[in-house]
């Protein structure tokens, strides 16, 4: 009887430690100091359990000088991967300071990128329903959004 209690206790301990390790690994990493408090961590691979966190940080703000939204994408350590002025998707209103609030649920599901620069970037969705596209990659990102919209409408 003692051996069964010892085995059961050891099993509970192992399962508990494994669960704790998976929970700890699944937490977002610490925000790098060069990003604002509103920066959004976007997971690269969305799987039910992780051994190691992988993803990127998206930081967006309203630039008073340019009178436009700016976004930058960094790796987990805060190293810059992509930064640009972001413009509203066609047919949407101009932006103000209050508008540039990234929708944490929708952003990260649609990505675009360029082979020439070797970068991928998420298409930011705002809480007011607007979509932002990078100025330097505007036409390519617009095709990506249009294609996604057309495939969702045909299903």
Image: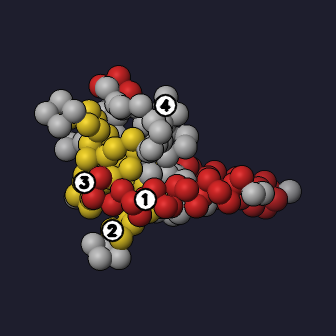
In the image, residue 104 above or below residue 142: above
Write down the residue under mark 2.
119
Instruction: From this view, report whether residue 38 is shown above or below residue 154.
Output: above
Q: Position of residue 23 (x, y in %)?
A: 55, 49
Q: CA distance from mark 2 to mark 4?
A: 25 Å
What label sits on residue 6 in the rendered view? Answer: none
Q: Label 4 vs label 1: CA separation?
A: 19 Å
Could you give the CA–CA distance between mark 2 and mark 3, rounded to whole angstroms?
A: 10 Å
In primary-sequence order, the first of circles 4 and 1 is 4
The residue that appears at 44% across and 51% down in the rendered structure is 123
> Dot 3 lies on which element?
strand
Could you tell me residue 55's position as x and y percent? 42, 58
Tell which circle, 2 or 4, labels the residue nearer the N-terminal end. 2
* Whole-number angstrom distance, CA of label 1 to CA of label 2: 13 Å
Mark whose residue sits in front, 1 or 2: 1
Residue in the image at 13% along x and 33% along y? 65
Q: Residue furthest left?
A: 65
User: In which quadrant of the rendered image does the C terminus lie?
Assistant: bottom right
Task: Classify residue 75 by image quadrant.
Answer: bottom left
Of residue 73 and residue 25, the one placed in the foreground of this image is: 73
Please state, as top left, top right, bottom left or bottom right, where the N terminus lies in the image.
bottom right
Instruction: Name the residue tied to disc 4.
Output: 127
């Amino acid at each position: 009887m003692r051996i069964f209690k010892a085995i059961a206790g050891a099993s509970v301990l192992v399962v508990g430690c494994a669960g704790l390790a998976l929970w700890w690994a699944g937490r977002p990493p610490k925000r790098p100091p060069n990003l604002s408090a509103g920066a959004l961590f976007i997971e690269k691979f969305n799987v039910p359990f992780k051994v190691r966190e992988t993803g990127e940080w998206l930081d967006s703000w309203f630039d008073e000088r340019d009178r436009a939204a700016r976004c930058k994408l960094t790796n987990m350590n805060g190293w810059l991967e992509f930064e640009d002025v972001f413009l509203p998707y066609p047919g949407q209103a101009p932006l103000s300071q209050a508008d540039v609030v990234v929708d944490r649920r929708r952003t990260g599901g649609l990505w675009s990128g360029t082979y020439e620069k070797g970068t991928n970037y998420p298409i930011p969705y705002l809480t007011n329903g607007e979509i932002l596209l990078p100025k330097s990659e505007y036409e390519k990102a617009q095709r990506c959004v249009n294609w996604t919209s057309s495939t969702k409408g045909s299903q």
